[in-house]
Image: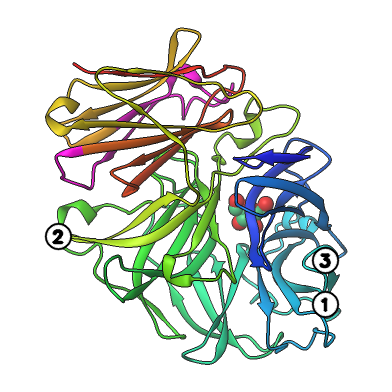
Amino acid sequence: MVKAYNFFSDFGWINDPNGLVYHDGCFHMFFQHHPDSSTWGPMHWGHATSPDLIHWSEQKIAMAPDRLGYIFSGSIVVDHENQFGFGDGQNTAWIAFFTHHDRDKFDRQDLNCEYQSAAFSLDRGMTWTKFEGNPILPNPGNLRDFRDPFVFWHSDSASWIMILSAGDCVHIYRSTSLTGWTLSSEFTVPVEDGAVWECPILCELPVEETDENRWVLFQSFNPGGRYGGSGTRYFIGTFDGYEFSVCEQGQDHPKQSEAMWIDWGPDFYAMNVWANVPHPKSGPIAIGWMNNWAYANQTYEKPFRGSMTNPRRLSICKLADGLFVRSRPAFELDTKSVSDDAPNIQIDLDGGSLCAVEVRCLTDKLHSAAIHIMSEGQSIASIQFEPKSNCWLINREKANPAETEDLFSGVFTFPRLVDSEDVIIELLVSKRGVELFFDDGMQTATLLLDQRKRVDEVTAIWG
Ligand code: FRU
C-alpha cells in the first residue's frame, strides 16, 4: 500500500527513523519497528521507500533480532569506493551500523548490554547480511547506554567517523576499516539529572546567504525534553574530524541562555538526516519520530502505533544575536491562507492527505489572536502569543493523545526567537497531528492530536 505523508507502518509499533539514505532516485527510510504488537518490544529495522518524500511504500522487514540482541538505532553509508570491501564489482554495497541490545543482559543489569554492529546489502537495502565478526565496537564494559551509531565519511581528515551516545556524553570515533574504531574525543554539556543521551547526529548545514557551512550536533534526550519526556536539542559548532566544539551559540545573549530545540513542541524525537543526497548545499533533509517517550506506548492510534513527521530541509540563519537552525517542509505545498476576511479553513483529511494552512498577521495584533484546531465545532488545540513574555503558548488540554499520562495535556510555552513585525505561522495538519512552522521555520513545534477526533477546521480569531 502506498501511503502519503506522516509515514506509519501498516502493522505494529514504530519509533526512531534509522539508516536514512538516498540512492538512484529513491529515498529509503529504515525505522525502529516491533511488527508483532503496537507497543515497544524486540526491535527490528522496518523499511520504507519513497520517490518524493511524500508517498511511502512499506517494504519487507530489513533486520530482525538475533543471538546478539535487538536491532537498535543506527545509520547507513553508501560505500561508493568499496572501502569496506563488501561490494561485488557490480553492486555498490550499503553498510548499516546499528546497536545490538542484549535484553537478557539488560534485564540482569549487566552494564555490558549494548555494542555496535554492522550489516551489508548489495540490493539497495532489500536484503541484509550481518557481518560475521559482530560486534565491530564492543562496549567499554561500564556503559549501560552505549548506542545509536551515526557514521559518515569525513573527507578533510580522510576517515570514517562514528558518533554515538555513551552514558552522559557523545563519543566520537575514527576508522578506515570496519573494526578499527579509535576514540578521538567526547562531547558533553550539563543536562538535567537523569537525562539519557540518545541518537546523536552530526552534519554540516549551509549558512544562508553565504558560502559558509557550520557543523551541527543534534542530540536527543530521554528524559531531558523541554517539557519532561523526550526532546531533541542542537549545538552549532566546528568539527575537524577529531573533535566537535560549540561556537557562536549559547554564550552571552539572552535568547540563547536556554537550550536550543530543533522542535519546540512535545512530539519530535530522534531526528535523523538522509545520507548520500545530491546537492548537499541545499542543506540536509531531516525527519523525526512524531512522538514522546513519556506516553508513546499509550496513544490512541490503532491498529498500529507511531508515525514520523514530514521531512524538513535544514539550514542555518544568521540573526543579529546568533546562529539558529531553520527547518522548512522538504516538499512543495499547496498552502491555503487564513486572513481577516476568511478566518476559517475547512479541512478534509480523508484519504490520508495533508492540509497546509498559512496564518499571517502583524505582531501588534498578536496579543489577542488565537489559532484553533477544530473538531466538530470544538477547539481541540490552540496557538496563542503572549507579548509580555514574548512566548508562544500551545494548548492541547482537549486533545490529550494518551489516556494515562497527563504530562502532555497541558500548555507548552516557549520564547519567540524572531523580532520581526510580520508573523507567519504555517500549519501542516494531518490525521496524526500538527506540525507548526513559525517565522518561516525559524522555530517549529510538533504535536500529536487525539486520533479519535477528526480535525475538520482551522480558525483564526483576531482580537
Ligand atoms: C531512542 C531509542 C534509542 C534506541 C531505540 C530503541 O528513541 O531509545 O536510543 O536505539 O530508541 O528502540
Quadrant assignment for ligand 1: bottom right
Give me the C-alpha separation between circle 1 and circle 3.
12 Å
Q: Which dot, 1 or 2, sits closer to the camera? A: 2
Mark 2: amino acid:
Ala
Q: Secondary structure at mark 2?
A: loop
Q: Secondary structure at mark 1?
A: loop
* Above or below 244: residue 20: above
Q: State the image quarter where residue 198 is shown.
A: bottom right
Q: Residue at x 46, y 24 (%)?
A: 409
Vertical arrangement, residue 366 with respect to residue 289, above or below: above
Residue 319 vs residue 70, the one in the foreground: 319
Crowd rating for badge 1 (residues with CA inside 10 Å; few <14, some 14–19, many 20+): some
Q: Bounds of the magenta span? A: 393-422
Task: Assess disc 3: are there few (<14), some (14-19) or many (≥20) residues with their C-alpha within 10 Å of its C-alpha.
Answer: some
- Quadrant containing the N terminus is top right
How is colour applied across the structure in the image?
rainbow
The residue beneath circle 2 is: 320
Spot occupied by residue 132 in the image (x, y as percentages of width and height): 86, 79
**Label 1 sits on residue:** 131
Say which quarter of the image contains residue 416.
top left
Q: In this figure, what is the number of numbered marks?
A: 3
Q: Which residue is mark 3?
A: 68
Q: Quadrant of residue 41?
A: top right
Give how far apart the Cα atoms at labels 1 and 2 are. Answer: 50 Å
The answer to whether one can see residue 232 in this image is yes
Q: What residue is drawn where x is 57% and y is 63%?
A: 274
